[in-house]
């Protein structure tokens, strides 16, 4: 699963780099960012997370009990219900595009607003097909077939990349329109590429919407709270976009680029581990109460330890070396060193949230495996309500009180999200403790990986500061850069950034080996065996 996600995210970064190269942080990039965010609400509401939470525990449970034929009928009925629901929401989204744009991006006016409306109407149908891909993912994951479903977004990204390349040299308005059509083609391709394997595993199915089967009603019963929980999270996403649009168009596009980067570790180490464990924990949930608790707690311990090994250095890199990450992945053409620095500021908030977001996903998957979708909903409501309450002050008022430029209000968007993610994670952990008993502690693991990551990060930051002081760009010592010590290096930016990030990764690996972190020593043993 991690391999599939990594492949799709790498191709996604290529897509974002082309966007940054051709469109930078301009009006068209901001319009596309807002336009994709609106249809993506449909995918996030009905797609992977929600459908997996409700379908996989029921479908995998039926298969674990040997009721394969019943599982096949459930899969067909759920597909039919999903197709009807998606069709209606796509039609509504196309018609209501002007209203949706005004809600999501109230700061957009004139040309920016009209372009965003047009892009929303183009992208919505393709996003609807992507939701059906989530059904494919649920079936494939239940059969322990993980790579294809998580690598399938490669074709979606690939279609957009082809569209961008074909439109190069045209006006920015034309380029962004081609990208929207590429998104539609990619949505269809992503569904089609998974369908043959799904049909083979099912042995055929009847995609007729029906609520007659008790198991289908159980899926719907779990689907509704999961849908509401995802909807609450989408409210938070809408508010973030609305705040960013009130700051500037640059803030909207920078937030979009930042989310692409920050979602890489969340997907690789949070979503991958949580989604891979969901079918297994769903099967464990069918055991007796004592056996169930023991099996699930062991999976939690192993999952949290694996997450910490990868997530902690990612968080440190976001906090200390975010401009280098943005430079290595995005900087070229219209995306400048100033944009890399601005992206770093926003990545700092994402770094605060990483550990909470990833472990929170695993806790939520545990509740879903226990067929409890209401508890994650309750805590999602608390998180989002708290975020909205703090968000306006943090984004619109706090920068002025601190004497910061208005555009730096975007930094507090991700910081507020990070703080509220910690609140949600702690609430989930406390509730799970009541359900399963004492939860496994990863304190000994954290006591090793945090020092290793911080030492590696400080050394890499020292190298960056030295290079900035010695080879800093002449005339760039302004408040934008934070002084001469943090000035951008007047050397080839991408090779320097990759070199320093590589040094950070190597130092972290060595530190983990010296501290005998199990994941690091296992990697070393595997490499030595191959030799």
Image: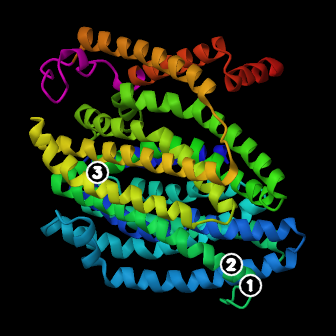
Foreground pick, 120 / 159: 120
Foreground pick, 431 / 278: 431
Foreground pick, 367 / 521: 367
Establish if 196 lies above or below 31: below
Q: Earlier in the sequence, mark 2 or mark 3?
A: 2
Residue 154 seen from this side: yes
Q: Which residue position holds label 1?
A: 214
Please report the bounds of the magenta region as a residue range. 473-495
Q: Which residue position holds label 2?
A: 218
Residue 377 is inside the magenta segment: no
Q: Where is residue 513, by image quadrant?
A: top right
Mark identifier at residue 253: 3
| CB under 8 Å between discs 1 and 2 | yes
Locate residue 117, reporting x and y percent: 27, 73
Q: Secondary structure at mark 1?
A: helix
Q: Badge 1: how crowded within 10 Å, few (<14), some, or many (20+)?
A: few
Residue 487 is inside the magenta segment: yes
Locate residue 110, reporting x and y percent: 13, 69
Locate residue 162, reporting x and y percent: 47, 56
């Amino acid at each position: 699963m991690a391999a599939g996600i990594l492949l799709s995210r790498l191709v996604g970064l290529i897509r974002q780099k082309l966007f940054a190269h051709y469109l930078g942080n301009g009006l068209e990039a901001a319009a596309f960012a807002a336009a994709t965010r609106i249809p993506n609400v449909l995918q996030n509401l009905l797609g992977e997370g929600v459908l997996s939470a409700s379908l996989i525990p029921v479908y995998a449970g039926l298969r674990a009990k040997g009721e394969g034929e019943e599982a096949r009928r459930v899969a067909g009925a759920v597909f039919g219900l999903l197709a009807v629901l998606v069709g209606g929401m796509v039609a509504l989204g196309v018609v209501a595009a002007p209203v949706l744009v005004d809600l999501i991006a109230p700061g957009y006016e004139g040309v920016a607003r009209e372009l965003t409306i047009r892009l929303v109407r183009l992208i919505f149908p393709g996003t609807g097909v992507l939701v059906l891909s989530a059904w494919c993912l649920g079936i494939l994951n239940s059969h322990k077939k993980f790579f294809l479903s998580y690598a399938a977004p490669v074709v979606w990204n690939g279609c957009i990349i082809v569209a961008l390349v074909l439109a190069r040299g045209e006006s920015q308005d034309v380029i962004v329109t081609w990208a929207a059509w590429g998104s539609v083609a990619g949505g269809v391709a992503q569904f089609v590429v998974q369908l043959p394997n799904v049909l083979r595993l099912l042995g055929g199915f009847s995609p007729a919407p029906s609520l007659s089967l008790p198991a289908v009603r159980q899926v719907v019963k779990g689907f509704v709270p999961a849908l509401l929980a995802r909807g609450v999270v989408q409210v938070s996403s809408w508010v973030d976009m609305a705040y960013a649009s009130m700051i500037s168009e640059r803030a909207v596009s920078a937030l979009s680029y930042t989310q692409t980067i920050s979602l890489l570790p969340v997907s690789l180490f949070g979503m991958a581990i949580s989604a891979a464990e969901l079918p297994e924990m769903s099967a464990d949930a069918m055991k007796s109460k004592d056996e169930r608790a023991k099996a699930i707690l062991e999976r939690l311990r192993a999952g949290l330890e694996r997450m910490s090994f990868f997530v902690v250095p990612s968080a440190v890199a976001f906090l200390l070396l975010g401009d280098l990450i943005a430079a290595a992945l995005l900087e070229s053409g219209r995306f400048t060193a100033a944009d890399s620095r601005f992206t770093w500021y926003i990545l700092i908030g994402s770094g605060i949230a990483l550990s909470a977001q990833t472990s929170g996903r695993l806790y939520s998957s545990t509740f879903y495996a226990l067929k409890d979708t209401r508890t994650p909903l309750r805590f999602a409501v608390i998180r989002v309500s708290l975020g909205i309450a703090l968000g306006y002050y943090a984004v619109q008022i706090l920068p002025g009180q601190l004497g910061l430029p208005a555009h730096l209000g975007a930094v507090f968007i991700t910081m507020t999200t990070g703080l509220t993610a910690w609140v949600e994670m702690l609430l989930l952990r406390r509730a799970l403790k009541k359900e399963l008993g004492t939860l496994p502690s990863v304190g000994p693991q954290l006591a090793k990986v945090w020092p290793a990551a911080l030492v590696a990060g400080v050394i890499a930051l020292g190298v960056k500061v030295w290079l900035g002081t010695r080879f800093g760009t002449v005339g760039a010592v302004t408040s934008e850069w934070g002084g001469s010590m943090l000035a951008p290096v007047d050397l080839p930016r991408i090779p320097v950034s990759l070199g320093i990030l590589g040094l950070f990764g190597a130092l972290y690996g060595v530190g983990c080996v010296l501290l005998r972190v199990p994941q690091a020593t296992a990697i070393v043993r595997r490499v030595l065996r191959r030799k």
